Amino acid sequence: MVELLTVMGYGDGKVSKRTNDEGLDGVIKEDKLGLDKIYVQAKRYAANNSVGRDVVQSFSGALDGKGARKGVFITTSYFTDNARKYAERLEAKKIILIDGMELSKLMIDHNVGVDIVIHI
């Protein structure tokens, strides 16, 4: 996910350690100069297993712990309506939610983690 965001034009990124990551999977620079940081959370769920408000709210709390104002939450599944509404209502910070469908499109558009096969 960090690689995808970097290819999309954000600055350098790094993946957090697997243990004691404080609920954050990675961090990227908002731009090439690193004027601001964007924290990343990624959840690989089955297509029928939704990400609810409680999980997004926990990510929001992890951002607070870092003093961060920006985050990207990516899942291979989908977000519940309550999760989306929660993220939209935040005023002190911005959390972007990327579900599995949008993630697939971004990966294809930016040729990250995919192989394009042309059938003749």
Image: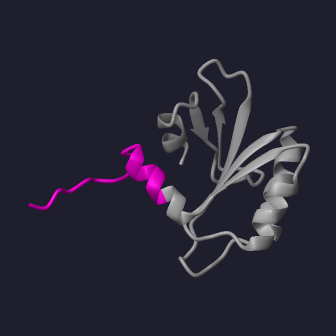
Asked if residue 12 is positioned above or below residue 74 in the image, the reply reads: above
Q: Position of residue 116 (x, y in %)?
A: 25, 53
Residue 58 visible from this viewpoint: no
Question: Does residue 86 appear to the left or right of 29 in the view shown?
Answer: right
Q: Name the quadrant containing residue 92.
A: top right
User: Split into 4 quadrants, where in the image is the C terminus?
Assistant: bottom left
Specify the farthest residue to the bottom. Answer: 48
Q: Position of residue 78 (x, y in %)?
A: 62, 70
Asked whether residue 105 is drawn in magenta, I would say yes
Q: Which residue is drawn at 63% across and 25% down?
A: 31
Q: Where is residue 11 in the image (x, y as percent from the top left)?
A: 58, 27
Q: Between 31 and 26, which is closer to the camera in this rendering?
A: 31
Asked if residue 116 is positioned above or below residue 111 in the image, the reply reads: below
Span highlighted in magenta in the image = 104-120
Number of residue marks: 0
Asked if residue 89 is positioned above or below residue 37 in the image, the reply reads: below
Q: Between 45 and 118, which is closer to the camera in this rendering?
A: 118
Q: Residue at x 72, y 73 (%)?
A: 80
Q: Which residue is drawn at 81% across and 56% down?
A: 88
Q: Name the quadrant containing residue 77.
A: bottom right
Q: Between 101 and 36, which is closer to the camera in this rendering?
A: 101
Residue 118 visible from this viewpoint: yes
